[in-house]
Image (cartoon, helix red, strand yellow):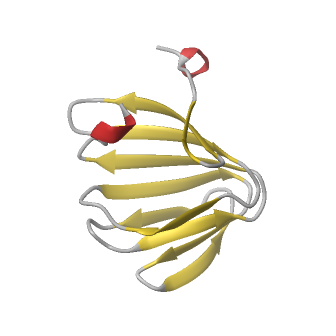
């Protein structure tokens, strides 16, 4: 497959994702609009977020940081987290187990 051929889905306002799924994982490639927020939430999935482009404010377990290209954040299962794009962003997330609701 080629990422350019995968259709983008707006999963939440301002978060446009291309998803790749295996049996146990989901790999998400996000184009995030400046100012778009993801409210604090939690899920059973382990998550690893990588900032590819832009500046993203992200809070994990009550601790807020400003993340820029090259930064990686590990979010354990069921830990509250949320964020906001301070600029247009490109992010990658890996989820385990796979995010069925993203299929």
Residue drawn at the location 40% of the way across and 68% of the way down: 41
Q: Nearer the viewer, residue 26 or 99?
A: 99
Marker count (numbered): 0
Q: Residue at x 61, y 19 (%)?
A: 4
Relative to residue 42, is residue 12 drawn left or right?
Answer: right
Residue 18: percent from left, percent from top: 52, 31
Residue 57 at x, y = what percent?
A: 64, 71
* Residue appearing at x 78%, y 59% in the figure: 87
Residue 85, placed above or below residue 25: below
**Residue sitting at 28 percent across and 29 percent down?**
22
Q: Residue 26 vs residue 15: left or right?
A: left
Residue 36, picture quadrant: bottom right
Q: Where, quadrant-wise, is the C terminus in this rendering?
A: top left
Q: List the single residue furthest toward the bottom.
A: 62
Residue that lies at the very extreme toward the front in this rendered image: 13
Residue 53 lies left or right of residue 44; in this view the side is right
Q: Is residue 7 above or below residue 72?
A: above
Question: On the image, which quarter does residue 66 sit in?
Answer: bottom right
């Amino acid at each position: 497959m080629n990422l350019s051929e995968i259709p983008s889905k707006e999963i939440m306002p301002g978060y446009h994702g291309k998803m790749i799924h295996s049996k146990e994982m989901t790999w998400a490639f996000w184009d995030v609009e400046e100012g778009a927020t993801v409210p604090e939430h939690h899920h059973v999935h382990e998550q690893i977020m990588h900032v590819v482009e832009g500046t993203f404010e992200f809070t994990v377990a009550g601790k807020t940081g400003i993340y820029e290209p090259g930064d990686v954040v590990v979010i354990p299962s069921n830990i509250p987290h949320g964020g906001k794009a301070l600029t247009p962003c490109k992010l990658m997330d890996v989820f385990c187990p796979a995010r069925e609701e993203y299929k």
